[in-house]
Amino acid sequence: MHVQTQTTPNPATLMFQPGRQVSPAGTHDFTSPEEAASSPLANALFSLGDVTGVFLGADFVSVTRDPAGADWAQLKPEVLAIIVDHFASGAPVIIESESYEAPAIAEDPDTADIRNQITELLDERVRPAVAGDGGDIVFHGFQDGIVYLKMQGACDGCPSSTATLKNGIENLLRYYVPEVEEVRAV
């Protein structure tokens, strides 16, 4: 099995592409070993000690390391070994399906059309680009002209994530959806 490795805009995160499906039912973002209990793969990666985040995309795994821990030259071979061993074993990536509930943002029922336009733009134009950098973006709501989004995977904590939200996503949404005044990170 050959696993391709790709850098991301976040220097603490590498994206690993095993050439097969990783997460068939959406993405999964784990920021602690406790959260990774439902994923044998994420749990094994956290057992390395220097891993602070694991993000499972449709066909990739993004791993974030502790900047104070081992550097990528030391950690990358260990991560590759865990990924190869996991897929060779045939073990599931997720044991039980956990449904993620976004924090409730009180939304006006009259803005359903606007929310639909926003989510369509995010799904068609933003999500593919963000996935190419080893992450994802989750829509949390629209209220009073403000779109609430959460960056995940390599994009969470990336030095350029604020610029991505403000200069990229906010400008795109404001152009196509005049009701959007601002984008805020959750």
Image: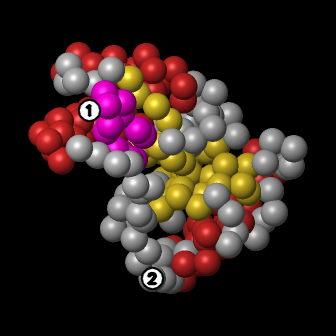
Q: Residues within 10 Å of mark 2 (few under 14, many from 20)?
A: few
Residue 140 located within the stretch drawn in magenta? yes
- Quadrant housing residue 181: top left
- Give the residue pinned by disc 2: 96
Give the mark, 1 or 2, whose residue is nearer the N terminus. Answer: 2
Please give the count of numbered marks on the rendered protein: 2
Q: Is residue 51 above or below residue 8?
A: below
Which residue: 63% across, 38% down? 157
**Visible residue check, residue 164:** yes
Res. 112 mark: none
Residue 58 located within the stretch drawn in magenta? no
Res. 125 mark: 1
* Pick the front one: 135 or 113: 113
- Measured as percent of width and height from the top left, residue 78 is found at 74, 61
Which residue: 72% across, 55% down? 52
Distance between the Cα atoms at labels 1 and 2? Answer: 30 Å
Q: Which residues are magenta?
A: 138-149
Residue type, label 2: Glu
Q: Secondary structure at mark 1?
A: helix
Relative placement, left or right, of 19 versus 8 is left
Q: Say whether marks 1 and 2 touch (CB < 8 Å).
A: no
